[in-house]
Image: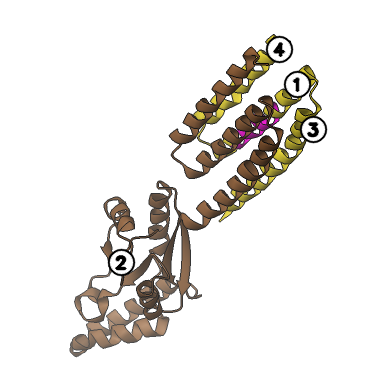
Amino acid sequence: MDSILIAMILALLIPMYEACRNDNIWQQMLAFGSIATKTSIIMLFISVLRDDWMIGVISVIILSVGNAGLMLLAHLIKGLNQT
Amino acid sequence: MTDNYVYIIVALLPITALMSVLQVNPYNALIIRGILGAVSVMIYAVLGAADVALTEALVGTMLGVALYVIAVRSSFVMRLGIVEPKLEPEPKLELELALAIKQRKIQESEELNENFSFIRETLFKDFEIEPKTYLPEVIDNIRKIVKKHYLRLELVEYPNSEMLEEALASEEVHAICTRQENYSNGSKVLTDRTFVPKDRIAVRVHRLFEILQPQLNIPNSIVEYKAGSDKEEKH
C-alpha cells in the first residue's frame, strides 16, 4: 500500500513542476487545481489506510471547499485581466 | 506511527516554499502560495492535526489568498490623468482644409502676414483642437512599460487641463499626460505645415519617473518629475 501512496506523491510533483516552469497565470491555476485535488485524494487514501475517520472528514471538506476557493480566485484574476 | 511516506510528504513543503519565494510576478506568487497551503494542509492532516489542517485550508489558503489578490490588485496601479476627449468628427481634416484656404488668402495679401497668430488662434478656437491626437500612442507605450513592472494603468479623465494640474498637486493621480501647445506665441509654426505638438508627462512619484524616463522613446514627448508636497514616495 505504501508504494501506491509514494506513486501518488510522485504524481503530485508533475503539476508542481508545471506551476514552477510556466509563466502563464492560467496554466498555474490549472496546476493549483490539480495539486489541491491530488492532496485531498492522498489524504482520503491515508485515512482509509489508517482507518481514521477524522482525517477522512477533513479531506472531504477540503476537497469541496478548495474547489470553491479556486473558483473565487479564478474569478478575481479574470476581473483583473479585463480591466 | 511514523511511516516512511510521511518524510516524503514533509519534503514537499520546502520545495513549494522555495517555488513561492522565487516567483517575481505577485499574482503567480499568490497562486504558488495556494499550492503551499494545499501541501501544508496535507502534512497537518497526515500528522494527525485535523483542526489545524481545516483552519489552514479555510483561513490560510482560501481567505488569505483571495484577500491578497484584492490587495495587490488595488495597490499595483498607476493612475494617469488625462483631459477627456471631445467628440468631434475628424478635426484634423477640417483643420487642414481651413489652413489651406486661409493660406491661399494670406498669400494673396501680404499685409496679413503679421496677423498670423490671430488667425491661428481663431482657427483653433473654431475647431476646438484638443491635444489628443497622439495620446493613445503615448498611453499604450506607458501601459507597456508599466506592465513590465506588474503595474496596471488606470486612466482618470478630467474636463480641462487646470483640473488635471490640480489633481496632480492634490495627489489624486500619480502622473498626468498633456499636450503642450507651442503654437500660441510663434508665427513660424503655421507656415511649415508639419506642426508637431509636444506631449508632456508629469510624474509625481520618483520611482515611476525613474521607470518611465529611460524607456519612453516616443518622439516629441518629455517626462518630467514633479515633487509633491510631501517627499514620501508611494505607489
| Label placed on residue A32 | none
Q: Are marks 4 and 1 in contact (CB under 8 Å)?
A: yes
Disc 1 versus disc 3: nearer the observer? 3
Measured in 3D between alpha carbons, the distance from the residue under mark 1 to the one under mark 2, in whole angstroms, is 64 Å
Secondary element under disc 2, as helix, strand or loop, is strand
In percent of width and height, residue A51 lies at: 80, 20
Taking the spot 20% from the left edge, 80% from the top edge, the residue there is: B187
Q: Amino acid at mark 2?
A: Arg
Q: Position of residue A50 (x, y in %)?
A: 77, 18
The residue singled out by tag 4 in the image is A4
Asked whether the beta carbons under mark 4 and mark 3 sit within 8 Å of each other, the answer is no
Residue underneath mark 2? B200
Q: Nearer the viewer, mark 1 or mark 2?
A: 1
Residue B196, compared with residue B21, is above or below; it is: below
Which stretch did the figure color magenta? Answer: A29-38
- Residue assigned mark 3: A57
Amino acid beneath label 4: Ile
Classed neighbour count for the residue bearing mark 4: other residues with Cα under 10 Å, few (<14), some (14–19), many (≥20): few
Give residue B40's position: percent from left, percent from top. 60, 31
Real-space Cα separation, disc 4 to disc 3, in angstroms: 21 Å
**Colour for chain B in the figure:** brown
Q: Do the residues marked 4 and 3 share a common chain?
A: yes
Q: Residue at x 55, y 56 (%)?
A: A83
